[in-house]
Image (cartoon, rainbow, N blue to C red):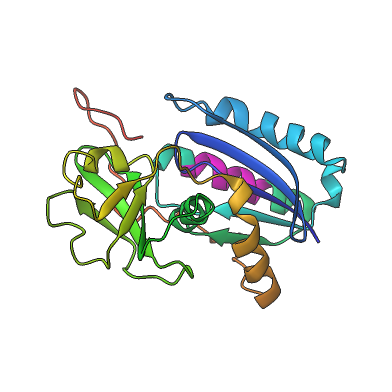
Amino acid sequence: MIYLALDTSTHLCSVAVFSDERLLALKESHNDTYTHAENLHLYIAEAVRMAGIAMNMIEVVAVGKGPGSYTGLRIGISAAKGICYALGIPLVSVNSLEIMALNALTQGGRYSSWLALTDARRMEVYCAAFDSEMKALDTVSAKIVTDTSFRHLPTPVAYFGDGATKCLPILQEPDFHFIPGILPSAAFLGEPARQKIARGDLENTAYFEPFYLKEFLAGKPGGSMPQ
């Protein structure tokens, strides 16, 4: 089965093409400003070309559903749904924090907890923790970062993601280890998506919405705009 995978939940705009378990192509870039609207469809076309397939050969679209940037999620999921409608193919979604944790696991290390953190503005993060078998240790949540936020997790703890820098001044003890450069790349969307496809765990494309986790608040005059 050939499927297109994409995640735009963070500043990373990431697109991959898989044939069953094999990664055929990956096109992604990280930018401190959100350029997903300009880049995503170009990256999809480039990934399809790199994979040596035609667009109409794609059988499923897999998308990182969040939590993460409101703007990024809307762009990515709108594109995924549009492709599904155009080609008459199903949609499958995967939690973006899980994708990030799968990326971190490839870095190795003996940790009892793998803590994925995505920036949620100010001192808040979206977070989820997993063990080395990718079993959830904590529910996905939005938390204000304090010195007690993650003390309940089994140690040692590896933490990572674009929300992790907020924790660096707090989580400096030997039991907490920061892994830099970990984001929800579509290259790691393949296996959880394949498992969902095999189970028939597909989304209702018409009604599927991003996993925002907390309420979307539009910017007000004089205030800051949402991500």
User: Does 39 sit left or right of 139 as displayed?
Assistant: right
Is 58 located above or below residue 179 in the figure? below
Location of residue 14 by image quarter: top right
User: Does 204 sit left or right of 172 as displayed?
Assistant: right
Residue 189, x across and y down, in percent: 60, 54
- In this rendered view, identify the residue nearer to me: 77 or 181: 181
Number of disc labels: 0
User: Image point 24% across, 56% down: which residue?
Assistant: 175
Residue 57, x across and y down, in percent: 86, 51
- In this rendered view, identify the residue nearer to me: 207 or 145: 145
Can residue 75 be found in the magenta stretch?
yes
Magenta segment, prevailing SS (helix, strand or loop): helix
- In this rendered view, identify the residue nearer to me: 185 or 41: 185
Can residue 171 be found in the magenta stretch?
no
Residue 85, x across and y down, in percent: 71, 53
- In this rendered view, identify the residue nearer to me: 22 or 13: 22
User: Image point 42% across, 56% down: which residue?
Assistant: 211
User: Does 202 sit left or right of 132 as displayed?
Assistant: right
User: Image point 27% across, 48% down: which residue?
Assistant: 125
Residue 97, x across and y down, in percent: 43, 54
Is 185 located above or below residue 2 in the figure? above
Asked whether residue 215 is in view, the answer is no
User: Image point 58% across, 25% down: which residue?
Assistant: 38
Return the residue found at the far bottom.
199
Q: What is the quadrant of the N terminus in the image? A: bottom right
Q: What is the quadrant of the C terminus in the image? A: top left
User: Does 160 sit left or right of 143 as displayed?
Assistant: right
The magenta-colored residue range is 73-82
Asked whether residue 29 is in view, the answer is yes
